[in-house]
Image (tube, rainbow, N blue to C red):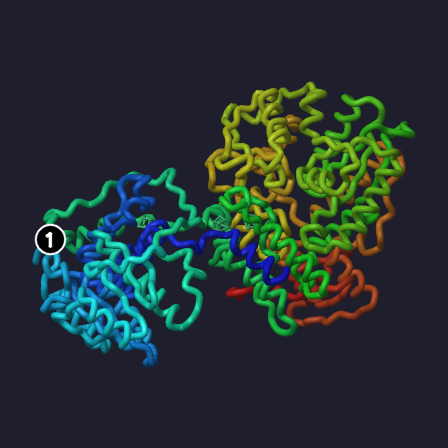
Amino acid sequence: MDQNELRLLENRCIQDEPPECMAACPIHVDARAFAGHMARGAGQDAWKVLKKTMPFPSILGRICDAPCRDRCKRGKAGQAIEIGRLERACVSTPAPKQRIPALPKKEKRIAITGSDLDSLTAAWDLARKGYEISLFDSGDQPGGCLLAMSEKILPRYVVEEEIRELSALGVDIRLNAPVRDEVFHGGMRHDFDAVYLGVDHIAALRDENNGVFVYGYFQNGSSGSPVWKAAEGRRAATSIDRYLQKVSLTAGREREGPYSTRLYTRTDGVIHLSAVQPLDPVLGYTPDEAIREAGRCLQCQCLECVKVCEYLKHFGGYPKRYTREIYNNASIVMGARQANRLINSCSLCGLCEAVCPEDFAMQTLCLEARREMVQKGRMPPSAHEFALLDMAFSNSEQFAMVRHEPGFKTGIFLFFPGCQLSASAPAMVKKVYAHLRRILSGGVGLMLGCCNAPAFWAGDENLFQAEFSSLRDRWNGLGRPQIILACSTCYRIFETHMPEAQIISLWRVLEEKGLPGDLSVKHGAIPLAVHDPCTTRHDSGLQNSVRTLLLRLSQPFEELEPGRSHTECCGFGGLMQNANPDLAKTVARRLSGKSPADYLTYCAGCRDNLAAAGKRALHILDLIFPEVGGPDPGARKRPGWSLGQENRIRLKDELLNELWQEGLRKMDDHEKTVLNIPQEVQLILEERRILVSDIKKVIHNAEKTGETLFHPETGHYIAAFKPYKATFWVEYSVSGSSFTVHNAYSHRMEVAGKGET
Ligand code: SF4
Ligand code: SF4
Ligand code: SF4
């Protein structure tokens, strides 16, 4: 990604756009920040916000006509925030002591006529830029019509104080000046480098050229609005500065004065609240009333994606910021790549894009970054190693197989159950395959293996392409049958990468061809909450098929909100579990909390993840193929990594033996090692992602070579072995011909984490 592309992408995220109040304000006071401080009762901080942008805040804060109200988002849920009244409440308290920084002196002299807010603002802004300012007023007191205002609204001492500050900045105030006199104007033209004519002194000099400037003369239209007057003075000051600096008078000034902002803020669902009415409308808000009124401010922001995504929340930012971090991460030649974990933790579920008003797709950014890291050899192996090893296992001889239906030499269909369903519920795979053979004629082949989504999610394109093309070859070898897919992740992968294949979801097949006859066991009359896997987000047809099946099963159900196109991830996808197991648990827990009902889903990964988070969850196959008198399917545990692999090995063995009469597979020597693993150690192994098969390898090797350490006090042995990239240590004891495992460790590198330990 080059800088240009980066900027374009960053700009898609509008979170940093100003809120409506700030954009509508002619001088762009940050009313959001101001209201935020006021709501906390932090008047001094609120004061500082005003001082940052507002000229003469003690004056303008009391008399601002608040045009921002018309665009305040709170207006859509009650009444607009009374920013004007809040400003008045703020500036009625003592101002914080702040030094006014001025730039080094400049050699140019500027004359300003009048002393209404426009002239005062122009003088203030230009003096702070270092110009030598002379302010000419026709009256005998500076302040113009400000002095004519009611003492209750704008006390005279306030005007005098602010004028004193102007003088302190070096502005030379000259009173009783003949500002309408031609000769006087001739003198100003001669003595000064630029002249600003205040709105209260506009004479016949107005120019056709939008009244902006004639030979160093600047003036504005007259406005009755105090804040507009200040804005006009500021605009003139900018023009004069640019004129004297000999730079473009117009470039980059699109956002001067009110402009439209792209910031999106949701107001549906926000409780309507009316504005707080001050007990004394003349005096305005009391401190308590001001706190209550400011508390109504919505603190407008977008963050639509962050609201629905634990991952985005976890890293404490939002996509615009992450884009830059990810780009910087890629640019680092040497040193720690702080954003590695950020890049690898996204579940690639696409919900951010679905909720974003600008369609920002964080998953595309993260996947691209992963690909780049893999290409450049910068992906830490620990990020995805375990998932890729599991994928390799699924594609190995231990699980992968492909056959025509027993007794057939060709086939019209091919059932691909996927690795997750086979790992989670192998018996179900056998039942589905039997049913498909019953309801479909012409031959239903079977292919076991992985769709290679882990390599795709890991950004390892070479590995993905190599494995997927071998899968494609096997499918071609079968004569290109229609593929029946039980897993929505497989469905997405096949749909995208094998467009030449005809694919169909198992749910559609069952919808069209029929469910099994014996549906006598029902889960119950209590509605189940349907969780749509994130890989079905854009496939309402697939989602509908599942609901049709539930209706046919007479299974009451309710929609899990948000569902369908806005369904939330379970933490399984995108290899989040590998890069950030704790975050994946938080994600699963969040999803679990959406409804107290038992969940019904149609992805084995989702079901198992929910079950691991303590949520009662069923796979739709539990309803379609109920086990009479069997255990409660809603309470089924996640099988864990080791059992998942054993289940796949056994499934293949049993299928080959029972359907194709090919006999049982010969076991490797290490597989014959008999282990006794106490429950608490099993949990440790699962947590540390250590497979029982690897423990068997370690003990088998130790017993064969005698390379062990013996602890005489405990009677335990410690042995190590490195079957592939990771090294495993196992502490065990011998009991007859079996081995009791007491502990195990593995050494895999950890991914450096931003802000994490
Ligand atoms: S939804 Fe997220 S990515 Fe989209 S504009 Fe809002 S904060 Fe940015
Ligand atoms: S609700 Fe608050 S932040 Fe939003 S537009 Fe109104 S004042 Fe500004
Ligand atoms: S793809 Fe999913 S996990 Fe990733 S940022 Fe978007 S919503 Fe969050």
Q: Is residue 755 above or below residue 394?
A: below
The x and y percentages for residue 408 are: 89, 28
According to the image, label 1 marks what residue?
A: 283
Q: Is residue 468 above or below residue 218?
A: above
Instruction: Tell me what residue is drawn at x 58 percent, y 66 percent.
Output: 328
Q: Is residue 518 above or below residue 538?
A: above
Query: Could you say which quadrant of the image residue 568 lies in?
Result: top right
Work out whether residue 752 or residue 349 is closer to the camera in this orientation and state it.
349
The x and y percentages for residue 57 are: 22, 63
Relative to residue 408, is residue 527 drawn left or right? left
Q: Residue furthest right?
A: 409
Can you see residue 53? no
Where the N terminus falls, by quadrant?
Answer: bottom right
Query: Badge 1 local density, few (<14 within 10 Å), some, or many (20+)?
Result: some
Amino acid type shown at disc 1? Leu
Work out whether residue 586 or residue 134 is closer to the camera in this orientation and state it.
134
Q: Residue furthest front?
A: 183
